[in-house]
Image (tube, rainbow, N blue to C red):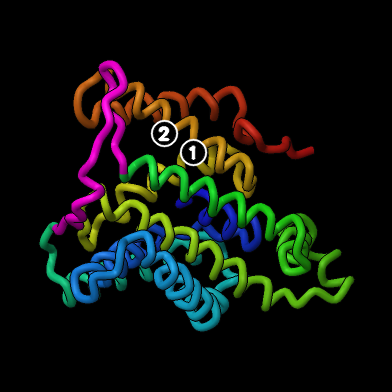
Amino acid sequence: MVAVGLTLIFGVMKIINFAHGSFMMLGMFTTYWLYLLLGIDPYLSLLLSIPSLFIIGVLTQRFVISQIMDAPAHNQLLLTLGISLFIENLALFLWTPNFRNLEVAYLRKATTVGSVMISFPKVIAFLFAILLTALLYYFLKKTDLGKAIRAVSEEKEGALTVGINMRRVYYLAFGIGTACVGAAGTLTAPFFYVNPHVGGIFVITAFVVVVLGGMGNFIGALLGGLIVGLAESVGAAFVPGQIKQLIIYFIFIIVLLFKPEGLFGRTSE
């Protein structure tokens, strides 16, 4: 979900969004506080975290990102990095740097199959991620707004020619991409710690996934995420601790060496 949102934003706007992980952190805190203060089930909080992050994404695009759409790439990178730093420091001020855990009784269950332990909240997160990604794919393929987004992604000049409102598409694309990462934060909160800096852990892996799948390739982001997830999980059985990350980066380097456009990207001619 993190990579799908990231690749949607890049595919439409050609902006590498370093604030993506910070938006995920907001999704995690939204779920955490809704459960702690109001007792709302973490998965029901998707009904609030997704539209909330969508609105935040649209406002960010409207009042901040839109100002540098025609600026050089390094200015765009610095701006999104600045947004990330602002959000993280605001979260530090509001909620302190303490590590928090979302303790939900029925999510503590785990099933053992042979010598493999299957985490209940991770299975739920996986199923929700597949469902939400499928719904987004249907939206992009079958609806008029989705077709407009795809048109802008593939051929901006042609999209302008047929009367597509480019500014509206940018708002929508950035909002949907942010909503995706907000949903990812909600789905991750039940089995991962919640902290103002937590987004950075996921966004680096998401960038690897996006490059593996082909920058801007929606299906590539989904399949790249599955490849990276499997590589990390299998690697954990053979190597200790964070060394398992080396397997992901090894795959990443091999792909860049032999297929730099990504596993599912198109070669430029």
Magenta range is 100-120
Q: Are marks 2 and 1 in contact (CB under 8 Å)?
A: yes
The residue under the point 41% across, 63% down is: 182
Q: Mark 1 is on which residue type?
A: Gly
Q: Position of residue 91 (x, y in %)?
A: 23, 71
Label 2 – label 1 distance at C-alpha? 6 Å
Tell me the number on the disc at residue 96.
none
Q: Mark 2 is on which residue type?
A: Gly
Label 2 Cα neighbours within 10 Å, binned few <14 / some 14-19 / many ≥20: some
The residue under the point 88% across, 71% down is: 161
Q: On the picture, is 152 further left or further right than 261?
A: right
User: 207 or 233: which is nearer to us?
Assistant: 233
Quadrant of residue 242 in the image? top left
> Which part of the image, by quadrant, shows the C terminus?
top right
The residue under the point 74% across, 39% down is: 268
Q: Does 105 appear above or below 247?
A: below
Q: Position of residue 138 (x, y in %)?
A: 69, 55
Q: On the picture, is 165 further left or further right than 96?
A: right
User: Which secondary structure, mark 1?
Assistant: helix
- Which residue position holds label 1? 225
- Answer yes or no: is residue 31 visible: yes
- Which residue position holds label 2? 229
- Answer yes or no: is residue 85 visible: no
The question of residue 227 being in magenta is answered with no
Q: Position of residue 126 (x, y in %)?
A: 43, 43
Q: Position of residue 145 (x, y in %)?
A: 73, 69
The question of residue 107 being in magenta is answered with yes
